[in-house]
Image (spheres, rainbow, N blue to C red):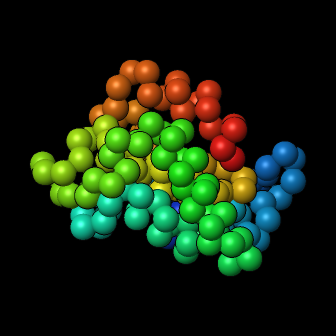
């Protein structure tokens, strides 16, 4: 269902109306949203900071200065409490970051894109500590 709401279903027919605040979805809907997938797939040779910076550089508007994008990445690193692992290589499953740390990176990569409308999270609590999800919910409004 989440894939349908996020308009990420490549096959089949979806019927009905999709509205945001009572209005039809804008043409830029997918570009204006972030989607945190259930699987944490990252370039294993990059650091946490590099992964977030790469996302910010590619996905935020080109008019946003590079320095501003990097400052936003630092804000995300702090929000997700990743200061201690910011320079760590992501690695592969079984070596490198823990499951919880990888999930934080996955969420961070999407937040670094600075979605304007929505952030979809597919099973964001799998593999992470009990306190982390409430921390994100309470602090995300200051970010987006």
Closest to the observer, 49 or 94: 49
Vertical placement of 60 versus 126: above or below?
below
Residue at horizontal 28%, vertical 53%?
88
Measured from the top left, where is residue 141 in percent x and y? 69, 37
Measured from the top left, where is residue 6 in percent x and y? 59, 56
Measured from the top left, where is residue 115 in percent x and y? 65, 57
Residue at horizontal 61%, vertical 55%?
72
Locate residue 91 relative to residue 138 in the image: left or right.
left
Residue at horizontal 56%, vertical 72%?
57
Closest to the observer, 114 or 9: 114
Outermost residue on the bottom side: it is: 62
Vertical placement of 1 versus 133: above or below?
below
Picture quarter containing residue 58? bottom right
Measured from the top left, where is residue 55 in percent x and y? 50, 66
Label tally: 0
Let me know if residue 55 appears in the view: yes
Outermost residue on the left side: it is: 94
Locate residue 38 relative to residue 142 in the image: left or right.
left
Let me know if residue 15 appears in the view: no
Residue at horizontal 18%, vertical 51%?
96
Closest to the observer, 7 or 107: 107
Locate residue 64 relative to residue 4 in the image: left or right.
right
Outermost residue on the top side: it is: 130
Locate residue 88 relative to residue 11 in the image: left or right.
left
């Amino acid at each position: 269902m989440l894939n349908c709401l996020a308009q990420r279903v490549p096959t089949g027919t979806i019927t009905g109306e999709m509205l945001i605040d009572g209005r039809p979805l804008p043409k830029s809907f997918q570009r204006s949203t972030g989607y945190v997938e259930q699987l944490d797939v990252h370039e294993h040779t990059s650091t946490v900071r590099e992964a977030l910076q790469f996302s910010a550089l590619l996905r935020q508007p080109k008019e946003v200065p590079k320095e501003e994008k990097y400052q936003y990445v630092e804000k995300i690193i702090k929000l997700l409490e990743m200061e201690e692992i910011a320079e760590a290589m992501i690695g592969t499953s079984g070596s490198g970051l823990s499951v919880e740390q990888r999930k934080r990176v996955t969420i961070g990569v999407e937040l670094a894109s600075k979605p304007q409308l929505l952030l979809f999270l597919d099973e964001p609590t799998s593999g992470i500590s009990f306190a982390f999800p409430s921390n994100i919910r309470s602090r995300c409004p200051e970010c987006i």
